[in-house]
Image (spheres, grey):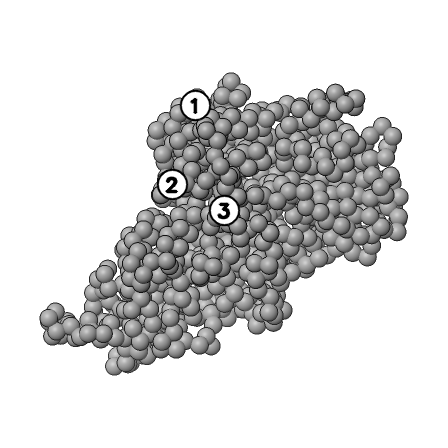
């Protein structure tokens, strides 16, 4: 069966909030073996062992593909990718930057 | 080296020759050159022989003239010549040229204090009718195996668990705690094994079984305390290294050497050539996967030394197909497929007519060669630094991982979040944390069986008394030798794989004099900034080509997802991963396994969890089928 990263667009409508889509992505790709694992919006994904090093790269790939943004190497930090809340804030700011131009990037 | 097996009975009942032969039949691969048994009321000893020293005279079990002491022994006492001289000078007479007889006489002369005089690798059982007891012992680092079980007043022992199972006194059942340790530490931690009721004798210990009770004692505890260095450490290293090799080339058969292309085995091969005054036959693995292959380095060294060199080319399909045999010999689930190519390599050695190989195991532990040691120091610095400072050094670790990842701000975080520096297990928390995520795949029933068991806490509570006084790197080295080198690298990937084809493995870096010399060196003599195995490299610069002496460590990271789940995968893999099979084994959750298989898929990038979990689940299925619930009775004679 050809199956790359779990594609949440197949199960979630396009206007799904970023938080819900990212949560679904994390659950399907990193917590598939424990569906009841308590994933909160502020759970520290690295410290809790949800994301490992390759998982981070997969997350970045997903965000870039899903939201059409580019994640700079320097942006791969705990603050931006270390929790669902952080990811949402980061992606939101990237999309705003893409819409409004680089000078108006939202502070997070 | 050989295989041993036997039974001691509290009630003095006979041990039948048939039972002994059945036990020996299960470990015959360890000793294809001969077999012997001895029994008396309440005791039976068996031995299968791999003839290496004194081919004619070294038959076993061996007894003294009065017949009060009988010995069944697996191993080599490399300083047997010196011991024999000492015993002869003290009036003891020898009938053979074997090291077996040296062990026997040493016992008669010195009792269990003989163990501290041995420089070798060994596991043996010795019955003393005057003591009315059975003595079992194992070498300092657990190079050779010894398993035992007690049931209903019977004491059953063997070189491999399958020898014990063949007694039919003990049947195979999983030990949940042993398995949880496999999925945390990469191997069950001695004395535990993956089998309920079956224990392994810890390295550096001996036991007396008398009157139905086993009393264990430790005769050796590795000491990682740095001491003041002498004036000429390079000279001292030269002497002890050469001596370690010299005594390990003692054999009445051809001695070969493994040559991986790295520093450690290059040193071993070079010194073996000098010791024997001719190049050894050398053996290597060559991988079809270019990222794994080290052939050019192997060829360079072999040519430099003039070795008669042969290489075994291995592809991923063959590695996958070898897994059932690998697991049968290893007797445990595993987290890597790395033992499988070693299984194939030892067959090459045997087919070439060679029975003994020297290998480089132990050098990375003894001279601080692993990335883990650098990582430990980097983590400590990062945690001691103010927030936001430090962490740049992490980018140099694990160069085989994508550079984008290693230069990201997150990369250092992975190491830093693993645990605090005052945790005695600090150095190994990232590894243990990674592996123990396999727990997420356990079935609810298996989790319930484990209850509150915490393998890390148990380890914390069983550290040597001096542990806290050692440097962070000294502690890391002890943990590495205790949790990985001894129970996994020397066992699953070492002895079990070479003896599968009747090949004896000798490991000069674990000569106790060399270990003690290296352990006493200041840390900086071993790990100097980013220069690992510094003193060994400095020494090697005078012996090896420059490229070999300075070559960085090449990590072996074989892919597992494609070989096990791709289009060329063996058919039995899907069988093993089916819900029915997974449920039958009772350890993993069928739903979680299904999720893993779907997640892996084809062309899927492998995360470390997927790699370890997939191998763990597949090899657990193989192990369960081979031992706990075989479709047919286990092969014996």
Tag 1 and tag 3 share a subunit = yes
Disc number for residue B528: 2
Res B580 seen here: no
Using a 10 Å C-alpha cutoff, classify the residue at mark 1 as few (fewer than 14 neighbours), some (14 to 19) or many (20 or more). some
Residue B214: x percent and y percent?
Answer: 77, 51
Label 2: chain letter: B
Q: Is residue B524 above or below residue B423?
A: above
Q: Quadrant of the C terminus of chain A?
A: bottom left
* Mark 1 / mark 2, whichever is N-terminal: 1
Label 1: chain letter: B
Query: In front: mark 1 or mark 2?
Result: 2
Question: What residue sits 41% from the left and 45% below the top?
Answer: B555
Where disc 1 sits, the SS reads helix
* CA separation in Å, label 2 and label 3: 14 Å
Q: Name the residue carrying label 3.
A: B474
Question: What residue sits 63% from the left and 52% below the top?
Answer: B190
Residue B313 shown left or right of residue A11 in the figure = right
* CA separation in Å, label 1 and label 2: 29 Å
Using a 10 Å C-alpha cutoff, classify the residue at mark 3 as few (fewer than 14 neighbours), some (14 to 19) or many (20 or more). many
Residue B276 shown left or right of residue B197 in the figure = left
Which quadrant holds residue B457?
A: bottom right
Tag count:
3
Where disc 2 sits, the SS reads loop
Q: Quadrant of the N terminus of chain A?
A: bottom left
Question: What residue sits 46% from the left and 75% below the top?
Answer: A37
Q: Name the residue carrying label 1.
A: B305
């Amino acid at each position: 069966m050809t199956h790359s990263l779990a594609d949440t667009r197949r199960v979630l409508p396009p206007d799904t909030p970023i938080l819900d889509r990212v949560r679904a992505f994390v659950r399907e790709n990193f917590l598939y073996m424990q569906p009841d694992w308590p994933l909160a919006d502020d759970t520290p994904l690295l410290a809790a062992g949800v994301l490992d090093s390759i998982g981070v790269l997969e997350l970045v790939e997903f965000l870039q593909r899903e939201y059409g943004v580019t994640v700079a190497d320097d942006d791969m930090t705990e603050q931006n990718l270390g929790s669902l809340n952080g990811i949402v804030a980061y992606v939101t700011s990237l999309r705003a930057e893409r819409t409004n131009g680089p000078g108006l990037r939202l502070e997070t | 080296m050989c295989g041993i097996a036997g039974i001691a009975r509290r009630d003095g009942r006979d041990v039948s020759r048939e039972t002994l032969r059945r036990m020996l039949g299960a470990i015959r691969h360890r000793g294809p050159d001969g077999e012997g048994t001895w029994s008396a009321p309440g005791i039976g000893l068996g031995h299968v022989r791999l003839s290496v020293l004194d081919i004619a005279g070294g038959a076993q079990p061996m007894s003294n003239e009065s017949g009060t002491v009988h010995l069944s022994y697996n191993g080599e006492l490399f300083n047997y010549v010196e011991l024999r001289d000492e015993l002869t000078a003290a009036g003891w007479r020898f009938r053979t040229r074997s090291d077996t007889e040296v062990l026997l006489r040493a016992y008669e002369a010195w009792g269990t204090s003989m163990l501290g005089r041995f420089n070798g690798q060994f596991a043996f059982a010795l019955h003393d009718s005057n003591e009315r007891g059975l003595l079992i012992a194992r070498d300092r680092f657990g190079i050779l195996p010894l398993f035992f079980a007690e049931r209903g007043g019977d004491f059953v022992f063997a070189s491999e668990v399958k020898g014990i199972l063949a007694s039919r006194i003990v049947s195979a059942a999983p030990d949940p705690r042993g398995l949880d340790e496999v999925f945390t530490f990469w191997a069950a931690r001695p004395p535990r094994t993956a089998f309920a009721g079956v224990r392994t004798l810890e390295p550096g210990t001996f036991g007396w079984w008398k009157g139905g009770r086993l009393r264990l004692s430790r005769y050796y505890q590795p000491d990682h305390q740095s001491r003041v260095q002498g004036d000429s450490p390079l000279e001292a290293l030269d002497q002890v290294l050469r001596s370690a090799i010299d005594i390990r080339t003692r054999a009445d058969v051809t001695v070969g050497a493994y040559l991986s292309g790295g520093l450690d085995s290059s040193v071993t091969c070079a010194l073996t050539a000098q010791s024997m005054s001719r190049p050894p036959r050398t053996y290597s693995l060559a991988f079809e996967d270019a990222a794994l292959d080290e052939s050019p380095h192997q060829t360079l060294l072999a040519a430099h030394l003039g070795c008669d060199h042969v290489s075994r080319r291995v592809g991923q399909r063959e590695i996958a197909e070898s897994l059932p045999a690998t697991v049968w010999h290893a007797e445990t689930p595993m987290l890597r497929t790395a033992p499988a190519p070693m299984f194939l390599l030892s067959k090459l050695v045997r087919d070439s007519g060679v029975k003994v190989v020297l290998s480089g195991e132990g050098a990375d532990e003894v001279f601080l060669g692993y990335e883990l040691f650098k990582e430990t120091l980097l983590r400590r610095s990062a945690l001691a630094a103010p927030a936001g400072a430090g962490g740049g050094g992490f980018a140099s670790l694990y160069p085989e991982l994508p550079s984008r990842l290693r230069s990201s701000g997150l990369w250092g975080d992975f190491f830093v979040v693993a645990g605090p520096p005052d945790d005695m297990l600090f150095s190994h928390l990232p590894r243990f944390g990674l592996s123990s995520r396999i727990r997420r795949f356990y079935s609810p029933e298996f989790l319930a069986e484990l209850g509150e068991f915490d393998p890390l806490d148990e380890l914390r509570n069983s550290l040597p008394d001096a542990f806290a006084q050692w440097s962070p790197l000294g502690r890391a080295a002890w943990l590495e030798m205790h949790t990985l080198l001894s129970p996994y690298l020397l066992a699953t990937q070492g002895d079990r794989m070479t003896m599968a084809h009747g090949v004896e493995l000798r490991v000069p870096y674990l000569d106790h004099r060399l270990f003690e010399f290296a352990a006493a060196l200041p840390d900086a003599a071993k790990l100097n900034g980013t220069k690992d195995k510094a003193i060994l490299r400095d020494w090697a610069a005078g012996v090896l080509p420059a490229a070999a002496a300075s070559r960085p460590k090449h990590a072996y990271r074989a892919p597992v997802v494609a070989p096990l789940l791709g289009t060329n995968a063996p058919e039995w893999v899907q069988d093993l991963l089916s819900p029915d099979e997974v449920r039958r084994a009772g350890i993993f959750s069928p739903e979680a396994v299904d999720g893993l298989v779907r997640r892996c898929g084809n062309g899927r990038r492998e995360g470390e969890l997927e790699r370890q979990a997939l191998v763990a689940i597949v090899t657990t299925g193989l192990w369960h089928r081979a031992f706990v619930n075989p479709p047919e009775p286990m092969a014996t004679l």
